[in-house]
Image (spheres, rainbow, N blue to C red):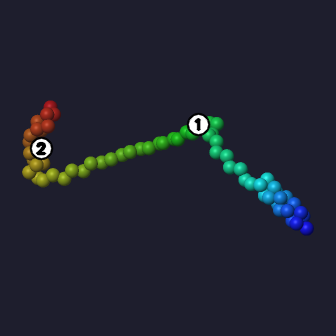
Amino acid sequence: MKIVIATLMILGFATLTGCTPRIEVAAPKEPITINMNVKIEHEIHIKVDKDVETLLKNRSDLFGQE
């Protein structure tokens, strides 16, 4: 009786080890391509005092522009 139980246990373990899943990690055959179509827009708003605004209008040579 012990031999039958031992044989069944060995067959059970053999069956379970034959059904284990296999996981494989491999590099892709084709290179990975990433398309990045990015459009960046920005606006800068500057608030100035009236005195500074008139100074900039009257003295346009302050920043070296001709």
Left or right of residue 47, residue 38 in this image: right
Residue lying furthest bottom: 1
- Residue labelled with disc 2: 56
Placement of the C terminus among the 4 image quadrants = top left
Specify the quadrant of the image occupied by residue 32.
Answer: top right
Going 12% across and 48% down the picture, which residue do you hit? 53
Going 89% across and 63% down the picture, which residue do you hit? 3
Going 11% across and 36% down the picture, which residue do you hit? 61
33 vs 10, nearest the viewer:
10
22 to 6, vertically: above or below: above
> How far across and down, in percent of the image, does residue 37 sit?
47, 42
Alpha-carbon distance for marks 2 and 1? 56 Å
Specify the quadrant of the image occupied by residue 25.
Answer: top right
62 to 4, vertically: above or below: above
Left or right of residue 34, residue 48 in this image: left
Going 24% across and 50% down the picture, which residue do you hit? 45
Q: Secondary structure at mark 1?
A: loop
The tag on residue 12 is: none
27 vs 30, nearest the viewer:
27
- Residue labelled with disc 1: 31
14 to 55, vertically: above or below: below
Placement of the N terminus among the 4 image quadrants = bottom right
Left or right of residue 52, residue 46 in this image: right
Q: Secondary structure at mark 2?
A: helix
